[in-house]
Image: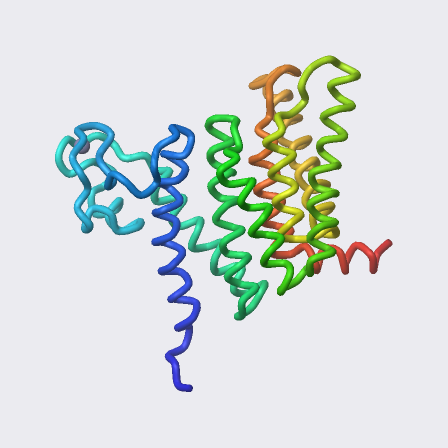
Amino acid sequence: MDVPPYFAELTLVMCGLCIGSFLNVCIYRLPLGGSVVHPASRCPGCGQPLAWWDNIPVLSYIALRGRCRTCRTPISLRYPVIEALTAAIFLLHWYAVGPGPLLFVRLLFACALIVLFFIDLEHQILPNVITLPGIVIGFLCSCVLPPGPWMSLAGIALGGGLLWGIAELWFRLRKVEAMGFGDVKMLAMIGAFLGGRLVVITYVLSSMIGGLVGATLLATRRADMATKVPFGTMLAFAALVASLYGEPILTWYFANL
Ligand SMILES: [Zn+2]
């Protein structure tokens, strides 16, 4: 078959930009409890529905110089950033996972993580409407693809159980809720997709990042000990790293033990 060079990469980037545009809608509307498909996108300033040419990922933002065509209300930079980020994450998965059905599963997983990352960052919630179906879909896909059904079940039990245990212990010790059960369900979802080994990598990595971010905020006095760090955001980032590079990290770790 004769395809132009970089055809697959280019197609994947285009898909990533368009799907990123849809993820923007999910991030904006899911916390408000609205439908993600209806109504069509409107300017939050003047309510003018967006024409398709004002809704082209990244390019429209540049063409409009970041403002609504009708009322000149500034458009959040978050929209083109999430579109470009989604495309970049798609491309990285292409290089890390390679072509095949597992790539589609991992891209779907990555989309869920991107949405959870931004919703938790802004609202400190992790909607059940993503995490619960995510556990089921992750397990079903793992029945026919890596990491396999048993590894997936181990991931769900370990991911959900680990965090649930820590939350319970923390609650007994300090009488405060360390984290919501959103985190528990999210880590179970990550376990369902990635399996028991990579869910441990995800947890260790997210704790390291959380500690680092927390220490930085404390040192620069932008937070105190009572400030809640959006743990779901750290989990989403760590799970993306695990999805892309978890196996090489494990190999490296055991080679240098
Ligand atoms: Zn407007």
Residue 82's place in the image compared with 30, above or below, is below
The image quadrant that residue 66 belongs to is top left
Which residue occupies the extreme left position in the image? 70
Give the colouring mode of the picture: rainbow
Q: Residue at point 74% right, 52% down?
A: 197
Residue 169 relative to residue 190: left or right = right
Which residue occupies the extreme bottom position in the image? 1
Q: Residue at point 39% right, 81% down?
A: 3
Q: Residue at point 25% right, 32% down?
A: 74
Looking at the rendered image, the quarter that the C terminus falls into is bottom right
Residue 143 point in image, percent of width and height: 64, 60
Which residue occupies the extreme right position in the image? 257
Q: Residue at point 58% right, 63% down?
A: 96
Q: Toward the viewer: 203 or 211?
A: 203
Q: Quadrant of ligand 1?
A: top left
Looking at the rendered image, the quarter that the N terminus falls into is bottom left
Residue 207 relative to residue 12: left or right = right
